[in-house]
Amino acid sequence: MSGKPGLKMSELADASGVSAGTIKHYLREGLLPEPVRTSRNMAYYPPEFVDRIRTIKRLQEERFMPLRVIKERILEGAVQQGDGERVSAAEARRRYDVPRNVLDRLAEIGVLTPSARGYDADDVKIIEAIARFRAGGYDEQLGFTVFDTLRYRAALEPLVVEEVRTLLDRLAGEVEVERAVEIIAAGAEPLRDLIGAMHSKLLLAELQRQRDDT
């Protein structure tokens, strides 16, 4: 063990086969995280930078892919993977016993996005959630309407924009496009569970706070 926190710039350049100038360019473009600085003029780079730099260079030279195109391909692949088998409108109504006018209104306000082939997997999950809400008493008689879903969409939209930006910044140039799509898809279900659990904790805490204030 040398005890060094990483590779010097010259060592990184030799190991990756890329010039120091190119590595500095990758750093300026945000393709690589900042190095570990031990002094004003001394910085060390993690050994895993070697493979990351090689991947970036290979995508640029062999596939002629600038970072912008890499990001676009990651997005396109993720969208295609999420647009699999669909459920027809008639089957969705039969399966979840949600009135047609409710589904139509959800589509009108953009919460559901059915195509001529029906609803995608996320649409079906939303319809199932609406059915469960209605069965639990969240219905029009108590003042709950489809427009309540817009509150959640408004809260989630800026979060999703930031999430996609972070994902693309971290994945582009570090892993192959196909692997990046797999990572994004694998994170969808755990993310739903994470958001659901955090929402539940915050909801119960707020109800407790308001009860204590009365």
Image (spheres, rainbow, N blue to C red):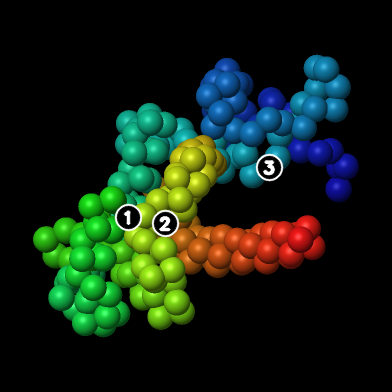
**Residues at marks 1 and 2, CA–CA distance in whole angstroms:** 11 Å
Q: Name the amino acid, label 2.
A: Asp
Q: Position of residue 133 (x, y in %)?
A: 43, 73
Between discs 1 and 2, the one toward the N terminus: 1
Between discs 2 and 3, the one toward the N terminus: 3
Q: Position of residue 163 (x, y in %)?
A: 51, 45
**Residues at marks 3 and 1, CA–CA distance in whole angstroms:** 45 Å
The reply to whether the C-beta atoms of the residues labelled 2 and 3 are less than 8 Å apart is: no
> Residue 68, located in which quarter of the rendered image?
top left
Q: Which residue is mark 1?
A: 111
Q: Name the amino acid, label 3.
A: Pro
Q: Which residue is mark 2?
A: 148
Q: Which residue is mark 3?
A: 47
The reply to whether the C-beta atoms of the residues labelled 1 and 2 are less than 8 Å apart is: no
Q: Residues within 10 Å of mark 3 (few under 14, many from 20)?
A: some
Q: Residues within 10 Å of mark 2 (few under 14, many from 20)?
A: few
Between disc 2 and disc 3, the foreground one is: 2
Between disc 3 and disc 1, the foreground one is: 1
The reply to whether the C-beta atoms of the residues labelled 3 and 1 are less than 8 Å apart is: no
Q: Which residue: 54% across, 32% down?
A: 31
Secondary-structure class at tag 3: loop
